[in-house]
Amino acid sequence: MNSEFEQLLMQARACRICEANLPLGPRPVLQMAPEARILIIGQAPGLKVHQTGIPWNDPSGDTLRRWLELSREQFYDPQLVAIMPMGFCYPGKGKSGDLPPRPECAPAWHQQLLNVLPNIELTLLIGQYAQRYYLGKRYKTLTETVRNWQEFAPSQLPLPHPSPRNRYWLTKNPWFEAEELPALRERVHQVLATPSAQHQAPS
């Protein structure tokens, strides 16, 4: 890992720009290395992730790893998978689930970090906040955006959030598991089968 990358990652993990708005204080949670091939941009850490400091270390992460057909070892290898949420810290509880990710993070850090991730071949945009930020408002709803995933492939794929709260959405939209998930898994296998990552490609 080069010194420029290490310094920037250390600065991001020490970020305090929205400290006054965080009920449990700042604890930026992100994972990356310059060699990473897949980038996951989700919403913000949940309470369990805040407590452990491990991204996607919850039931949502279990579902996401199943969607991707990645083991925990592969998922948590920063040379394969970079994880950069829209909000780096746990934003606190709202009336129905967690609050939205803090708006300061992405403008402050995302482009700087993307500049030192030159090998990303696939970016997964999970949830409405990541999709609006990176895809704009081409479609009115998350369902419409995800339904038209082929427009953004193969470099970007919009996904619903894998939260247990989204079981109803998955039941109502069976095309996601029937159509997009197989394409997602094929693309993940393809990206990780490139020469620099081949030794850790999914079996």
Image (tube, rainbow, N blue to C red):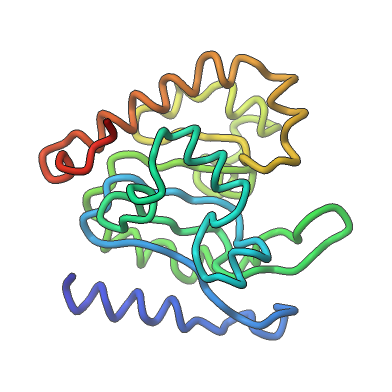
Front-most of 134 and 177?
177
Name the one closer to the observer, 37 or 8. 37
Q: Residue furthest left?
A: 195
Residue 28 position within the rendered picture, expressed as x and y whole percent measured from the top left: 52, 73
Instruction: Choose top left, top right, bottom left or bottom right for residue 182.
Output: top left
97 displayed left or right of 181: right
Q: Residue at x 49, y 51 (%)?
A: 41
Say if 187 sits above or below 132 in the image: above
Looking at the image, is 167 positioned above or below residue 33? above
**x, y percent for residue 176:** 58, 21
Which residue is most to the right? 95
Which quadrant would the N terminus be assigned to in this image? bottom left
Quadrant where the C terminus sits is: top left
Q: Position of residue 112 (x, y in %)?
A: 36, 67
Q: Is residue 198 left or right of residue 189?
A: left
Q: Is residue 177 above or below residue 194?
A: above
The quarter holding residue 4 reads: bottom left
Q: Position of residue 36 (x, y in %)?
A: 27, 52
Q: Quadrant of residue 152?
A: top left
Count of picture labels: 0
Judging depth in this view, the residue of 72 and 175 nearest the camera is 72
Residue drawn at 42 percent across, 27 percent down: 184
The residue lying at 85 percent from left, 52 percent from top is: 96
